[in-house]
Image (cartoon, helix red, strand yellow):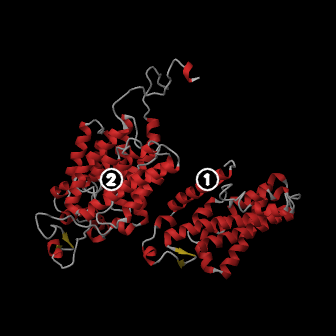
Amino acid sequence: MTLWRTLTNGFYTENPIFRISLGMCPFLALSTSVQNAIGMGAAATFVLVWSNAAISALRNVIPDKIRIPCYIVFIATFVSLVDMVMAAYAPPLHKALGIYIPLIVVNCIILGRAEAFANKNTVAASLMDGIGMGIGFTLAMALMATIRELLGNGTWYGVNILGRDFANQPVLIAILPPGAFILMGFVLGGFAIIDRRKGRAA
Amino acid sequence: MAETRTFQLSMSPHVVSALRTRRVMFDVVIALLPALAGAVWLFGLAGALLPVVLSVVTAVTVEYLCLRLMKRPVNAALDGSAVVTGLLLAYNVPPGVPWWLPVLGSGFAIVVAKQAFGGLGHNLVNPALLGRAFLVASFPVLMTSGWSAPFDWSHPGGSGFETHGIPASELASVPGADAISGATPLRVMKDSFGDEDLRRSAAVERALASGGTYLNLFLGRRGGCIGETSVLLLLAGAAYLVVRKVLELRIPLSYLGSVALFGWAFGGPSLLHGDPLFSVLTGGAVLGGFFMATDMVTTPVTPRGRIIFGIGAGILTVVIRRFGGYPEGCSYSILIMNLATPLIDRFTHPRVLGEVRRNA
């Protein structure tokens, strides 16, 4: 697999959210607004890229039996960095994301890529994989947040799109937890239809 | 292969009965019509009939489109189940809501609660109630306030209700007023509970004072959703269903019985000071108990299971009314028990003839 293929793999073919269904917790909880979604996507991507690189670089040194705790140490280090940087330079976003920033430590995408990819590939490939997966995650978050913010608030990135009448009486459930699950079902259904049209196994 | 078969193998049950989906569904529609007539009498054509018609038309149309889209037999759209869902959804919205509200709720009920799960017989919860839950979560203001008071035909020009101490008949004489809004009896009671000073006073009496007498509650002359107010007309419809052997009374009786019992025990300002009659006559208890907690798809099939279902929904209704955030918990209690239905069926599974009881 070329580096380019490794990079684009995460965009669609193996999109972490819509294809391998990892990282559902931050995905469902923080896709309430496009701003939150992109903030979360950027934070997770940063952690993913550097933890992938670090774990890949040390893959021959880390003892196999305790590899998971080792991964967690790396991931937690980068999460702490993100947490502090965000608190210092983007306090409103930091406040909006709240508990979900420390929880990036247990984001399944990051641990999943460490275990499934960085553990057995070169540093360059792992970097590419981290960037690709991170972009895939961010795109998925942004797509879901676009739907939810438009329906539930009438806005996109805080800008009113659907008019004041709609914003006064939006479909509130879209930005509530049940709406996340319902819309997720429809989006996954949409991807299944696309797959079937293409003649691929879903 | 098929020609060489000499036996026809089929799953149990092997009992053939005259009950067919279409017959059952249209019996339910007939049973719901008196309440619709009552709603039109109380809330007017625009307030009650329009939402009902829109909701039913949407339900059938959306069902047809869904079946078409999924390449399933479209005749199923005409089996009457969509009509019942549309009717019940509209009965669960306040009178005089904007036209798009029942349309949206009805569409949601069919698409998400019913067709997404595989259509009639496969839905986990009552579609109409999920549609209502969707509307309450999405449009809390429209769904839980601005109740129009029923029109009182004995006092031309106004309703017999009092709102904020002012007789509604006086309010109605205000030029330009089309309808009068007032709180539902349950909302009045809930607000009384919330008020520390009033906590010890008889909340039910305050609610009764605002909503009239037991007789008014029985006849439906109170604020409430379109189809839930007239207990008399709902009971008339239920009696028709019992005569037609469509309705089985275990769930409604155990449900209303436990609403009364637990409403008496816990629904009042202090223990054992609730009002059992008030608990049953207000809110959606009668509509829910007879027409929504008895949906054949989403309720237990065993006799014991049905009684457990009714009691469970009754307890939850009282708990939500007394301690929850909403004044009425009928719809949520039935939805929660719908989800417990597979479990109830499993544990009340009757012993097969000849099966030896384990650990006997």
Relative placement, left or right, of A84 versus B322 is: right
Local crowd size for mark 2, using a 10 Å CA cut-off: few (<14), some (14–19), many (≥20): many
The answer to whether dots 1 and 2 both sit on one chain is no
Q: Say if residue B222 shows up in the picture.
A: no
Q: Position of residue A65 (x, y in %)?
A: 81, 51
Relative placement, left or right, of B310 versus A163 is: left
Amino acid on which the number 1 mark rests in the picture: Ile
Q: Nearer the viewer, residue B291 or B307?
A: B291
Q: Nearer the viewer, residue B131 or B288?
A: B131
Image vertical order of residue B313 relative to residue B97, above or below: above
**Pointer 2 indicates a residue of which chain?**
B
| Label disc, if present, on residue A193 of the rendered structure | 1
Q: Is disc 2 placed on a helix, strand or loop?
A: helix
Local crowd size for mark 1, using a 10 Å CA cut-off: few (<14), some (14–19), many (≥20): few
Image vertical order of residue A185 relative to residue A166, above or below: above
| Label disc, if present, on residue B338 of the rendered structure | none
Q: Position of residue B247 (x, y in %)?
A: 30, 39
Relative placement, left or right, of B274 versus B111 is: left
Q: Is disc 1 placed on a helix, strand or loop?
A: helix
Residue located at (34% from left, 34% from top) = B19
Query: Separation of disc 1 and disc 2 at Cα?
Result: 32 Å
- Look at mark 2 in the image and give the residue it sits on: B87
Residue located at (75% from left, 65% from top) = A132
Q: Considering the image in quadrants, where does the N terminus of chain A appear?
A: bottom right
Amino acid on which the number 2 mark rests in the picture: Leu
Q: Nearer the viewer, residue B279 or A140?
A: A140
